[in-house]
Amino acid sequence: MTQIQDQNSAVLEALTKCEDQVWQALVRGDPEADAAALDDDFLGVYPDGFAQKSDHVAQLENGPTVRDYTLGDVRVLVLGGDHAVLSYRAEYRRHGQDAVEVMFVSSIWRRKGAGMDTGWINVFSQDTPWAEGSPP
């Protein structure tokens, strides 16, 4: 059981770093960094509908979309040898706005190559806005 826990901890750490890179791309307005993190067949499921990789990257054409953010209550579920889902609560402010928004995110990542340090690519993400009045 300890080996599974250690593996999950390593995957949690790796995917948290990967997810942070996506958020940093949104803060910097960096479409190249955003594109590098997403699989060519990426699928996003958002409150306004489905999105492909090109849609996700296109949101950065006019610069940053996020001013700042915090990721909390981060957890991982290993789905097999090369896939895992990272779920967390995001608190963020959009670029040019002061209001803090909250959403819950689940993103599926696929390992690229062999071994723990080869990297991961985001293949799926679903954002669920926090419903006002529900438990945080």
Image (spheres, rainbow, N blue to C red):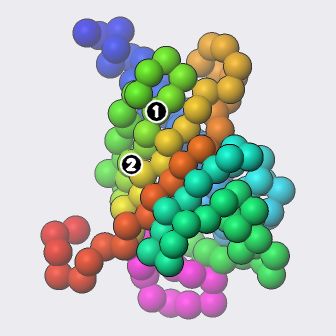
Question: Alpha-carbon neighbours of circle 2 within 10 Å: few (<14), some, or many (≥20)?
Answer: many
Residue 108, compared with residue 83, is above or below; it is below
Point out the stretch of residues depicted in magenta: 91-102
The kind of residue tagged 1 is: Ala
Do the residues under discs 2 and 1 have CB atoms within 8 angstroms? no
In the picture, the disc for residue 40 is none
Question: Is residue 6 on the magenta stretch?
Answer: no
Q: Which residue is mark 1?
A: 84
Residue 50, compared with residue 72, is above or below; it is below
* Picture coordinates of residue 78, whole percent (x, y): 40, 28
Q: Is residue 28 visible?
A: no
Q: Is residue 79 visible?
A: yes
The kind of residue tagged 2 is: Ser
Residue 20, compared with residue 98, is above or below; it is above
Q: Quadrant of residue 113?
A: top right
Q: Quadrant of the N terminus?
A: top left
Q: Residue at x 51, y 72 (%)?
A: 49
Q: Nearer the viewer, residue 55 or 25?
A: 55
Q: Secondary structure at mark 2?
A: strand
Marks 2 and 1, how far apart in space?
10 Å
* Picture coordinates of residue 99, whole percent (x, y): 45, 88
